[in-house]
Image (cartoon, helix red, strand yellow):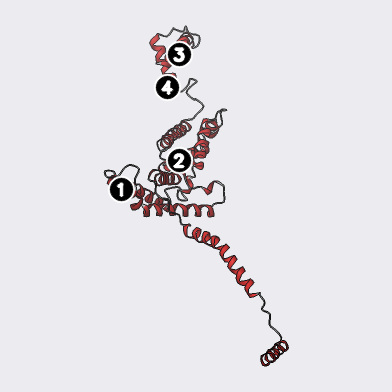
Amino acid sequence: MAPVRCLLPLLPALALALGPAAGELRRPLALGEAEELAEELWDAEGLPGDLPELEPECRRLLAAFAEGSATLTGCLGRRARPVRLCQDCHRHYRSLLAQYGSIARAVGNSSESHNCAKSILTSDRLQIVVTLSEFFNETWETANCANCLKNSSEGLSNSTVEFLDLFNKSLTCFEHNLQGQAIYLSPSNYTEVCKNCNETYKMLNDLYNNLQRMNRQGGESGHSAHLCIDVEDAMNITRKLWSRTFNCSVPCSDTVPVIAVSSFILFLPIVFYLSSFLHSKQKKRILILPKRIQSNASLVNIQEKYS
């Protein structure tokens, strides 16, 4: 009834303009008849404000995009913490891309109507639909969700599924061992967690490092060096629990090489001085008397003996 109230000041003009026929005396419309006529005009999309320039098909595409945007926005907001954007919202994002593509390709039915893409996307300075689409695309690219999905983006990749499975096993192990020792130990002592969950955590950490290494080798663009935000956030949560909350030692695969190199450096001075000593001893010359001097000396000794 709000549109009818807006039209009340126009009722006299409507009453004069709508007569039985030209040249006949126009009878003023009653209030009820004017309200009914106003509602008919509003329903017939003949008044400004109801987007008369959009065809029904273009209006349907715009409504579908608006509904898809709201659905994707809700999914992104609900999956913000802990981050589950890529694994839970990829279907909504793919659907929104298809809806935007339908708007960009659609053309009105009649020859006099505008192209749907022009009417919806570029007919005003603000360009709401384009702005929303760019926001979702930028968010998706910044999250690197393509690194977690298959090539067709129809589901999670095998490596991502394997990682998330190990991640869930690690959290289950943490929870199980915390329930078992909470009665006997203080909250700051988590030895059972460190002992019983060490193998699962090590497998998860090694898999994450391998995924990072493979991603750096296979990616050519700058942002591809990062894994998707879901995997990165899951690993950050696990490492914080393991090192800060439980105070467990972080397994390091480079421990043996580091110890070997450190030992070699420590023994270098000993090896240097020992080699210098042996080398100098070999070069020490021993004086040998000539044979003539030896014979003369022996003769003198014999003479002295008998004298």
Q: Earlier in the sequence, mark 2 or mark 1?
A: 2
Q: In the rendered view of the protein, which quadrant contains the N terminus?
A: top left
Q: Which of marks 1 and 3 is nearer the N terminus?
A: 3
- Sort mark 4 into few (<14), some (14-19) or many (20+) by Cα contacts within 10 Å: few
- In front: mark 4 or mark 1? 1
Secondary element at image label 4: helix
| Quarter location, residue 27 | top left
The answer to which of 65 and 115 lies nearer the viewer is: 65
- In front: mark 2 or mark 1? 1
Residue at which label 1 appears: 177
Type of the residue with mark 3: Cys
Q: Earlier in the sequence, mark 4 or mark 1?
A: 4
Secondary element at image label 3: helix
Residue at which label 3 appears: 6
Type of the residue with mark 2: Tyr
- Looking at the image, do the residues carrying marks 2 and 3 touch, with CB atoms under 8 Å apart? no
